[in-house]
């Protein structure tokens, strides 16, 4: 079984970093995946820690993330007495079992977390430094996909696309999209859209980028301000890691002060380009107003301070 070197060096007192390979610590496996987990069931995995250091080391054992409270550690020969730390002998290996107890009320989704092996402050004999002390943390990434949860198919899905409130001429309209991340890892995504007025492309929109955790549904947003009355069609899709989802389309009719309609229509793919011109313009105007206001305040302040001398 290969031993992956996954050591994070946490600096204390402004000390310099020490390469993980030089310290000689490794943990295996680097990742744990449990598929089709069932609520109320236990799942046990074995972890191995190897050391080529010149002194024994003691590491605490904890869980983090979604399953932090699901994790219990045991020695290989006793599965009834939980342990909270493991001793790694000089030039040796240590083994531990980790039990994942799935709650009865766990929902059918994907849970993400880590197993963390964290050292105390290590002495110079282990780090090889001169008077140095460091703390080490070795993580094992864990993914638990519950039975009934969507399979990780390597893609993001655009679940819905709509607007909030009542769009009006000359006012900012918020566009909301719900995206589901079924890629193997967390990924950054943003909403991109093409705006058509009376069937003519008049603008493109780009929302803020958001990190979507693996297996999660998140709402991402963008904004648009209609500048003309007429029948609008907004074709939106999500851009992520160089890929894009299929598109969804919303329609609205904007009059001089209100809008009617507002249906959502599934559409084929399509490539949106460019940025959010309306949003950038609004941001620029807002920034200009702030700068002007600040300049006016400074001018008045200087004038008042100088007045007594005139």
Image (cartoon, rainbow, N blue to C red):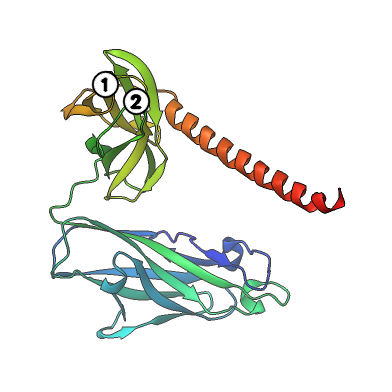
Residue 287 x %, y %? 56, 38
Disc 2 is placed on an element classified as: loop
Q: Residue at x 47, y 70 (%)?
A: 50
Spot occupied by residue 27 in the image (x, y as percentages of width and height): 43, 65
| Mark linked to residue 135 | none
The answer to which of 151 and 22 lies nearer the viewer is 151
Residue 275 can be seen, yes or no: no
- Tell me if residue 306 comes above or below residue 241 in the rendering: below
- Label 1: state its secondary structure: strand
At horizontal 70% and vertical 46% (from top left) the residue drawn is 300
> Compared with residue 137, is residue 217 higher up or lower down, i.e. above or below?
above
Q: Residue at x 30, y 21 (%)?
A: 270
Q: Quadrant of residue 66?
A: bottom left
304 and 33: which is toward the camera? 304
> Which of the two marks, 2 or 1, is nearer to us in this view?
2
Q: Report the front residue among 75 and 272.
A: 272
Q: Please give the name of the residue rendered at 34% of the width and 51% of the height, measured from the top-left corner.
A: 213
Residue 232: which disc? 1
Q: Give left or right: position of 271 versus 283.
A: left
Q: Quadrant of the N terminus?
A: bottom left
Alpha carbons under labels 2 and 1: distance apart? 9 Å
User: Is 83 or 298 nearer to us in this picture?
Assistant: 298
Q: Which image quadrant for residue 104?
A: bottom left
Tag 2–tag 1 contact (CB < 8 Å): yes
- Name the residue that disc number 2 marks: 226
Find the residue positioned furthest to the bottom.
Answer: 81
């Amino acid at each position: 079984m290969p031993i992956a070197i996954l050591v994070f060096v946490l600096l204390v007192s402004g000390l310099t970093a020490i390469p993980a390979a030089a310290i000689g610590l490794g943990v295996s496996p680097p990742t744990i995946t449990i598929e089709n987990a069932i609520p109320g069931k236990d799942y046990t995995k074995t972890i191995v820690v190897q050391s080529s250091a010149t002194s024994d080391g003691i590491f605490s054992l904890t869980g983090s993330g979604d399953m932090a409270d699901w994790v219990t550690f045991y020695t290989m020969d006793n599965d009834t007495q939980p342990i909270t730390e493991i001793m790694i002998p000089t030039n040796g290996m240590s083994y531990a079992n980790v039990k994942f107890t799935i709650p009865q009320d766990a929902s059918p989704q994907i849970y993400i977390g880590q197993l963390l092996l964290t050292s105390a402050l290590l002495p110079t004999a282990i780090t090889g430094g001169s008077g140095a002390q460091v703390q080490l943390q070795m993580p094992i990434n864990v993914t638990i996909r519950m039975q009934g949860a969507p399979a990780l198919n390597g893609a993001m899905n655009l679940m819905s696309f709509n607007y909030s409130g009542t769009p009006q001429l000359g006012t900012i309209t918020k566009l909301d999209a719900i995206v589901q991340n079924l890629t193997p890892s967390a990924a950054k995504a943003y909403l991109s859209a093409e705006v058509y007025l009376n069937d003519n492309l008049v603008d493109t929109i780009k929302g803020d980028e958001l990190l979507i955790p693996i297996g999660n549904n998140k709402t991402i947003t963008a904004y648009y301000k209609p500048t003309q009355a007429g029948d609008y069609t907004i074709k939106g899709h999500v851009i992520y890691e160089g890929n894009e989802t299929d598109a969804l389309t919303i329609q609205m009719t904007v009059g001089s002060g209100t809008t009617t309609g507002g249906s959502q229509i599934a559409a084929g793919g399509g490539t949106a380009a460019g940025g959010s011109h309306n949003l950038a313009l609004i941001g620029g105007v807002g920034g200009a107003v702030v700068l002007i206001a600040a300049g006016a305040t400074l001018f008045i302040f200087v004038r008042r301070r100088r007045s007594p001398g005139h």
